[in-house]
Image (spheres, rainbow, N blue to C red):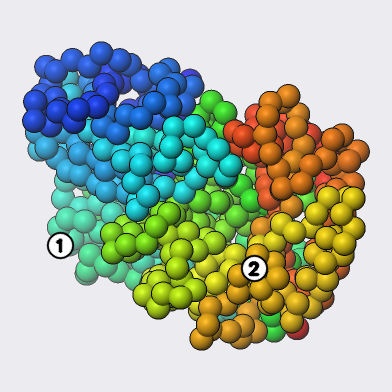
């Protein structure tokens, strides 16, 4: 059952070793393992766990939500004999939260942060016989300072809070690279208006007399074939893609752009040579797309683009934050597109790169969001800042991501309306992200109490039920024009903090809906309730009519794609079954096609 697909689609090598599967496992509730040297290869653990599933999940084989903040993993590795003489890298997709890694009893490195990838060079600790890999994890279940997103700090899930995820929850793998020189990272930055792609190459090791060969193809046709001597570990090259070989047709029939309607991707292969010997080779891809704002609208590839997004928590019944199969990521996107959505807001979760790959491939906008802490402190500033540096490093190349959301509903900055320090942090993280990524939009505080922001993102669940006519009329009126939507009527909070104001940025309704419809006969909740399929479709249409009648909104994000645990307010059940025919939702979503609103 374990996950077998290559875990890093933006930088693919042919040779790799998947370390998912059954590992030995132990709880360490007294936190005595470090002192007692549980990392020694001979130490036996009493349990088994299926990696990469957290012990709280059914797929792990353990399935308990008891508090266990200290856990240990162990497994034997049989590294291929032919890898000898190469540098061996050990990769972790994500481990929640603080990790120490040991190989054959020797400490090889650590990482802090529960949602981002990290790698270690373990060459010197390998014996190429039966190597023993041991992982120690500390995940403080009740610590509200760490970025935890929807993971509840109490035992039983309730309200909007879900089961915790402790330990390894994304793929673990090994790969060999050349001992002398290898490609450490790549960044693709499209210069859409000029038809150019800029590639930032990052090399590791001795670059003396090494050469790099770059081949860019589109639809199997070679556009670029270039070879250069490597002069620096950080090298930049720009390539013009349209020497009359790729037709630059108009936006809607674009054969060269990336949009949800035309998810065109360019294939890239990069090779490193030492004289005539090939020493490293990676495959990647990129999309040509541009995002900017103007006249109260979001523009995609220089055309106004109305976003119809769905809130996606990224949880599954058997795997929690880890999908059981790669096909699950693909299917979620396909189901959303079948309902007429052109993207999603990944809520309070840094999603697995495999989801982003399928969003790139299938054509699906993603708003990338981090897991938030619940309180503010100097520690949370450090945790979040470091996490965002790692998020952007990992996910920069995915064209599907067009917006970053570092803060949601003042989580982690609960006194932002009156505390200038917290406002400074909101501004600082906004500018930090822009300082390293100029290709995307950034929202300073999705929902309310914004500071500097590229999108005015407003939340409102005040639409009432079908019998609450006055509530619905007030909801419709609150969205009608700019003055109404910028008033504090939605959540009894100001949309912008004192000293900050709307400066013409696009206004989107980025949370609303949440209509509860129970298909499982289990107790749950929604923001409003429907009691039949007919009622559910009617309620969805009624709420969307109010949103789409707004004179100022230039997009929306409906809550939410699926039920999650006690929340029964999804368009799909928790196990991705249709609540109503998907074409009925699509018909409502596509009944109105906005063009130039929001001025």
* Badge number at residue 492: 2
Residue at horizontal 22 percent and vertical 68 percent from the top: 232
* Quarter location, residue 409: bottom right
Q: Position of residue 212 (x, y in %)?
A: 30, 60
Of residues 213 and 33, the one drawn nearer to the viewer in this rendering: 33
Q: How many marks?
A: 2
Q: Position of residue 500 (x, y in %)?
A: 53, 84
* Badge number at residue 67: none
Of residues 7 and 558, the one drawn nearer to the viewer in this rendering: 558
Q: Position of residue 51 (x, y in %)?
A: 38, 26
Q: Secondary structure at mark 1?
A: loop
Image quarter in which the C terminus is found: bottom right
Residue at horizontal 24 percent and vertical 46 percent from the top: 111
Q: Choose mark 2 or mark 1, whichever is in front.
A: 2
Residue at horizontal 51 percent and vertical 86 percent from the top: 499
Of residues 212 and 466, the one drawn nearer to the viewer in this rendering: 466
* Badge number at residue 208: 1
Vertical placement of 363 versus 50: above or below?
below
- The residues bearing labels 2 and 1 have C-alpha atoms spaced at a distance of 62 Å
Residue at horizontal 55 percent and vertical 72 percent from the top: 449
If you read the primary sequence from the N terminus, does the residue marked by circle 2 or circle 1 appear first?
Answer: 1
In this orientation, does residue 387 appear?
yes
Task: Specify whether 290 is left or right of 518.
Answer: left
In this orientation, does residue 77 appear?
no
How many other residues sit within 10 Å of disc 1, few (<14), some (14-19) or many (≥20)? some
Of residues 89 and 318, the one drawn nearer to the viewer in this rendering: 318
């Amino acid at each position: 059952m374990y996950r077998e697909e290559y875990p890093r689609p933006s930088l693919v090598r042919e040779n790799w070793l998947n370390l998912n599967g059954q590992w030995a496992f132990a709880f360490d509730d007294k936190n005595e393992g470090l002192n007692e040297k549980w990392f020694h290869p001979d130490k036996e653990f009493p349990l088994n766990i299926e990696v990469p599933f957290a012990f709280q999940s059914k797929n792990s084989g353990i399935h308990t939500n008891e508090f266990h903040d200290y856990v240990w993993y162990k497994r034997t590795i049989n590294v291929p004999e032919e890898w000898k003489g190469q540098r061996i890298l050990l990769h972790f997709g994500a481990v929640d939260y603080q990790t120490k890694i040991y190989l054959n009893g020797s400490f090889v490195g650590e990482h802090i942060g529960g949602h981002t990838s990290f790698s270690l060079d373990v060459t010197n600790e390998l014996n190429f016989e039966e190597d023993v890999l041991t992982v120690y994890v500390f995940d403080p279940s009740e610590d509200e300072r760490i970025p935890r997103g929807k993971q509840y700090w109490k035992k039983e899930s309730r309200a909007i809070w879900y089961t915790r995820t402790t330990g390894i929850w994304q793929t673990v793998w090994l790969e060999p690279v050349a001992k002398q020189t290898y490609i450490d990272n790549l960044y693709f930055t499209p210069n859409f208006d000029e038809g150019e792609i800029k590639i930032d190459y990052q090399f590791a090791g001795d670059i003396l007399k090494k050469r790099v060969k770059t081949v860019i193809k589109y639809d199997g046709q070679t556009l670029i074939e270039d070879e250069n001597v490597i002069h620096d570990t950080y090298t930049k090259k720009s390539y013009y893609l349209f020497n009359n070989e790729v037709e630059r047709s108009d936006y809607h029939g674009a054969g060269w752009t990336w949009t949800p309607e035309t998810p065109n991707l360019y294939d890239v292969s990069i090779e490193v040579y030492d004289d005539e010997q090939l020493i490293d080779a990676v495959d990647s891809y990129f999309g040509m797309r541009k995002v900017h704002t103007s006249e109260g609208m979001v523009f995609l590839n220089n055309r106004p683009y109305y976003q119809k997004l769905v809130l996606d928590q990224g949880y599954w019944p058997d795997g929690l934050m880890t999908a059981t199969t790669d096909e699950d990521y693909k299917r979620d996107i396909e189901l959303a597109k079948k309902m007429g959505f052109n993207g999603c807001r990944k809520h309070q979760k840094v999603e697995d790169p495999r989801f982003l790959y399928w969003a790139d491939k299938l054509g699906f906008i993603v708003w990338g969001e981090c897991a938030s802490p619940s309180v503010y402190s100097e520690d949370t500033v450090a945790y979040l800042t470091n996490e965002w540096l790692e998020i952007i490093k990992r996910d920069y190349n995915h064209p599907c991501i067009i917006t970053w959301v570092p803060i949601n509903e003042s989580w982690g900055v609960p006194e932002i309306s009156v505390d200038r320090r917290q406002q400074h942090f909101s501004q600082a993280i906004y500018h930090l992200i822009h300082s390293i990524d100029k290709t995307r939009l950034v929202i300073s505080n999705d929902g309310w109490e914004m500071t500097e922001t590229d999108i005015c993102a407003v939340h409102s669940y005040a639409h009432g039920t079908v019998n609450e006519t006055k509530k619905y009329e007030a909801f419709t009126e609150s969205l009608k024009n700019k003055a109404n939507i910028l008033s504090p009527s939605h959540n009894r909070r100001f949309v912008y903090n004192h000293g900050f104001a709307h400066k013409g940025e696009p206004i989107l309704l980025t949370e609303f809906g949440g209509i509860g419809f129970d298909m499982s006969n289990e107790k749950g909740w929604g923001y409003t309730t429907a009691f039949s399929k007919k009622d559910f479709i009617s309620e969805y249409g009624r709420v969307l009519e109010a949103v789409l009648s707004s004179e100022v909104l230039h997009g929306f994000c409906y809550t939410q794609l699926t039920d999650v645990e006690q929340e029964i307010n999804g368009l799909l059940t928790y196990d991705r079954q249709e609540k109503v025919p998907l074409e009925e939702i699509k018909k409502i979503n596509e009944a109105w096609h906005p063009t130039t609103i929001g001025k």
